[in-house]
Image (tube, helix red, strand yellow):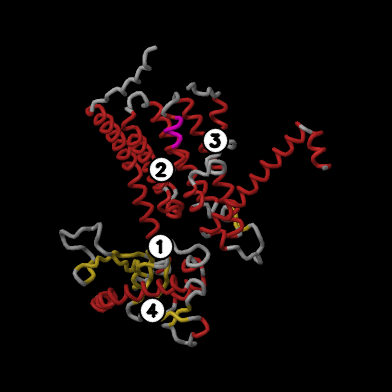
Amino acid sequence: MSAPRAPDPPAHVPAGKLLRTLASAGAMAGLLIVVVWGWASPIIAHNKALALQAAIQEVLKQPERCDTLYVVRGALSVTPPSGTDLKTVERVYLGYGPDGRRVGFAVVAGEPGFQDVVRLIFGYDAATHQLIGMKVLESKETPGLGDKIEKDSSFVGQFRTALAPLVGVKPERRQPGDRHQVDMITGATISSRAVIRIINNALARLGPMLEAYSEAQ
Amino acid sequence: MTRQATTPNQDLLRGIWRENPVLIQLLGLCPALAVTNSVANSVAMSAATMFVLLGSSFLVSLLKRFVPGEVRISTYVLIIATFVTLADMTLEALVPTIHKALGAFVGLIVVNCIILARQEAFASRRPVGRAMLDALGTGAGFTIAMLMMGTIREVLGNGTLLGYQVFGAAFEPWVVFALPPGGFLTLGFILLFLSWIQRRRAEQARVREWPEGVGERRAA
């Protein structure tokens, strides 16, 4: 009886064929992604612009028109200096009422909250140091708890009349008449404290520029 | 070893219930637990997963003769990642609010084991038509599981269904169902319920098959 025959070794695949396969798959993937990106990119940019416009309208109480100002070298400028990267330059928005009077600045700012970075926009009157409104743009705070910073109307409503700098207090410790104080949300202390910190830090950084621009015009 | 032949009907229906990827095979649990806190999120995630399943099954089955075994996994992952990128861009363009709510979980479809498993186990060995039927059935099964979880969690955790109030103003939502532990609880209850139904059916079948024997055992 003869010994059992050893199985045939697997067919050798040349390295060139493996490379060609992966390169073709990569090229096809790249082509598909570029085609769809060409279609989606303008729509995504348009959606973001619409969302920002709606947020500015909300926090500045429906201004008649808005100017975009660029933060360049510690000052605000209507036109950015040549060579400025428009994709990264920080912007603030100045709203005007129907009579052409300024209603305030809308400032976008973000810092870490409880789960992730909270991005918000707030309206601010530099002459009176009064906040005009606040809207959360992006947040991954805990549903049902931390997300009250955008859903709790009594919390959000406080930012329509409060004065900067803000001080977060527990509701039972609030002193009547002190417009610097903002009631924090029970069960969402870290998130509500983050909102107050974001606004205070943004105003500490940009406040002097906003005031200087208001006085100069 | 001979491959067990299946009919097109079986290829389509298998993934919907008998081999449901989430409820029976317990695959793809990451999105099932993470984004099912509302029905709208569940629908969007299911649609994105279905799109990726159909697209990648089509291409993998179509190109199976040209892809050497040595680089098949890399090629499948590349194909899957391409369709996930397309789904991500499309969702961001068409439904930006839902895209924002789904967060990183759209990108994580690339590593959803349901999809890679179907490519490796089925699409890479069968004709395009069968691969598409299998993808459609598996996608439908995933959608059913996501909708079951999304409905329960949104109703109990938020008191709404598709954003509309279900209970009166006096209802205090069970917030835990909107949180990650609620995903585990809901999946656990659904699996418990399905297991109970399965055992009950098996018991009934046994009674039908051996009525006298069962009677004797009961009497004893």
Q: Tell me the SS state at disc 3.
A: loop
> Label 1 marks which chain's residue?
A
Where are the magenta residues, as a range? B117-122
Asked if one can make out residue A44 in the rendered structure from this viewpoint, the answer is yes
> Would you say the magenta stretch is mainly helix, strand or loop?
helix
Circle 2 sits on which residue? B87
Q: Tell me the SS state at disc 1.
A: strand
Rounded to the nearest angstrom, the CA distance separating label 3 from label 1 is 39 Å
Residue at position x 33%, y 47% in the image: A42
Residue B15, which numbered label? Answer: 3
Residue neighbourhood size for the residue with mark 2, other residues' Cα within 10 Å, grouped as few (<14), some (14–19), many (≥20): many
Residue neighbourhood size for the residue with mark 1, other residues' Cα within 10 Å, grouped as few (<14), some (14–19), many (≥20): some
Looking at the rendered structure, whether the residues under marks 3 and 1 are on a common chain is answered as no
Q: Is residue B214 left or right of residue A87?
A: right
Q: Tell me the SS state at disc 2.
A: helix
Rounded to the nearest angstrom, the CA distance separating label 3 from label 2 is 22 Å
Rounded to the nearest angstrom, the CA distance separating label 2 from label 4 is 44 Å
Q: Position of residue A182 (x, y in %)?
A: 45, 79
Q: Is residue A121 magenta?
A: no
Residue at position x 54%, y 35% in the image: B15
Residue type at numbered disc 1: Leu
Residue type at numbered disc 2: Ala
Circle 4 sits on which residue? A130
Rounded to the nearest angstrom, the CA distance separating label 4 from label 1 is 21 Å
Q: Earlier in the sequence, mark 4 or mark 1?
A: 4
Q: Position of residue B182 (x, y in %)?
A: 55, 57
> Label 2 marks which chain's residue?
B
Asked if one can make out residue A103 in the rendered structure from this viewpoint, the answer is no
Residue B211, which numbered label? Answer: none
Rounded to the nearest angstrom, the CA distance separating label 3 from label 4 is 59 Å
Residue closest to the far left: A82
